[in-house]
Amino acid sequence: MKEYFQMKVDGAFRLFSIEHLLTLCVIGLLAVFLFTFQKKLRQSEWKNGLRFFLAAALLISEAAIQFWYLYYGNWSVKSSLPLELSDLAVLLAALMLATGNRPLFAFLYFAGVGSSLQAILTPDLGGYRFPHFQYIQFFTAHGLMILACLFMIAVEYYRPTFRSLWITFLLVNVYGVCIFFFDRATGANYLYLMHKPKAASLLDFIGPWPWYIISLEAMTLIVFLLLYVPFGITEKEGRKQLSMKTKQKWSRQSD
């Protein structure tokens, strides 16, 4: 059992290995479950209990990784703070679930889901593989963050707006500027603003430093727009139906 918690491990995480794909499938199935049983969950007396359970699980996952760093004497300002966008989203998602804050949901849907999807698809895990604690904690935290937003959509009927997309994009850029100066001051590499991660990632395909940061800006906006597409289509259909009903109403009144 001790080998599943040790800091130094042999081997390397393999991208899209069987264990990686199975983990992604589990997260995907839980998402499907939320939308399949969304009506029952809305009417269930356990709805609020499930929200707070998800919030507690997110907080515990972050507390667990911080304790692990401290226990093995590996905690560092340069690498252990939850300043990566997907890590910060884990803490903010717990707050969103507990408070039901709608602007926070909108920010997390775009910035949190977007960054967490990238994290679980191309994780920077070094040599940690299943069933190591680091592997389980990483996918649990980021998977639950995505599910937290999907829960608010499916069960609480929250919706992001096109305006919130641009507000989130602006906030992410402001946050990135702050982290850039923090990285420069501490020698850290949060948000990978100083150099690319050692593990394979999407950054490998978009140029060298610092030009990949510009490409990353464009990719971020594209991801945000793709995340908005389902809601944009729904809003467009809703406006069409409202327009048709209005026309029918005026037509009957004129008759």
Image (cartoon, rainbow, N blue to C red):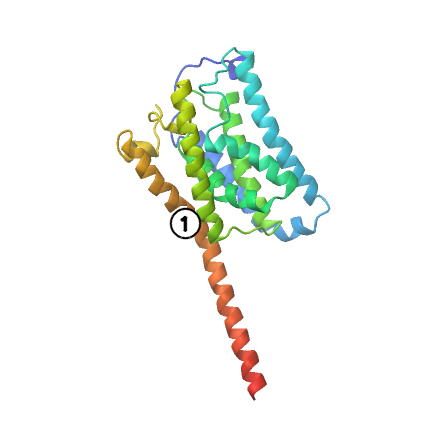
Q: Amino acid at mark 1?
A: Leu
Q: Residue at x 30, y 34 (%)?
A: 212
Helix or strand or loop: what does disc 1 sit on? Answer: helix
The front one of 67 and 125 is 67
Q: Where residue 185 appears, x then y in whole percent?
A: 41, 20
The quadrant of the picture occupied by the N terminus is: top right
Q: Is there any visible trace of residue 18 in the rendered image?
A: no
Q: Where residue 134 appears, x then y in whole percent?
A: 50, 22
Mark 1 residue crowding within 10 angstroms, few (<14) / some (14–19) / many (20+): some
Q: Residue at x 62, y 35 (%)?
A: 55
Q: Where residue 53 appears, x then y in whole percent?
A: 66, 35
How many callouts does the rendering have? 1
Q: Is there any visible trace of residue 197 in the rendered image?
A: yes
Name of the residue lying farthest toward the bottom: 255
The front one of 146 and 232 is 232
The quadrant of the picture occupied by the C terminus is: bottom right
The front one of 23 and 199 is 199
Asked whether, in this view, residue 92 is left or right of residue 177, the answer is right
Q: Which residue is label 1 attached to?
A: 225
Occupied quadrant, residue 128: top left
Asked whether, in this view, residue 226 is left or right of residue 131, the answer is left
Q: Residue at x 47, y 43 (%)?
A: 168
